[in-house]
Image: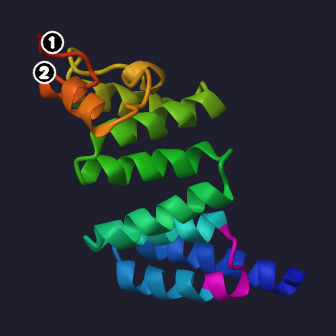
Amino acid sequence: MSLVDSETAKQMCEDAKHALARGEADSAIGRLQQALIFHPRSADAKMLLGIAYAQKGMMDEALDALEEAVSVSERNPVVHFNYGSVLMKVGRVLEAITQFEEALRINPAYDKAKAALEAAKKQWGEQMYMPPSTARPHAPTSHKEEAATTKHGGWFGWGKKK
């Protein structure tokens, strides 16, 4: 990829941001698809494409684009925040919590991620929330163990085991 291609992709991303701000998701999607031709690994283009798809209600496409953005730019807290935001919109709250936590691990001062994490935890319910590192202490070794573990309350600890 040449410097010209990179600059062209950046300009297309800027144009797409303006289109999104005006509510013109279709225009943004077209620009971002073109930007990805010039710079196929652009995390910004993939992230913005995910946002544009979400604006149109195309949630599967939005999640796919944002997942790709995370894979290309794992250390970008804004990508994790936006991925978490779309996960919230589709009701995948626990996964969203993980994304907001990752955004804050990368940038502890990221206020939007802090607010989103608080809202997600509130929605999930404090009695049901456990940090991902403690949510499932070990994977079951058999289907019987899986059934025994989940039969009376699941991995998250609510309910009683007999």
Q: Residue furthest right?
A: 3
For disc 2, the neighbor class at 10 Å (few under 14, some 14 to 19, many from 20) is: some
Q: Tell me which residue sits at (38%, 30%) in the image.
A: 117
The amino acid at mark 2 is His
For label 2, the residue is 152
Q: Tell me which residue sits at (38%, 73%) in the image.
A: 61
Is 140 positioned to the left or the right of 13 in the image? left
Q: Secondary structure at mark 2?
A: loop
Quick check: 74 above or below 41? above
Whether 71 is among the magenta residues is no
Kindly report the distance in space between the C-alpha atoms of the residues bearing marks 1 and 2: 5 Å
**Which residues are drawn in magenta?**
35-42
Quick check: 26 above or below 49? below
For label 1, the residue is 161
Whether residue 22 is visible, yes or no, is no
Residue 75: x percent and y percent? Answer: 68, 44
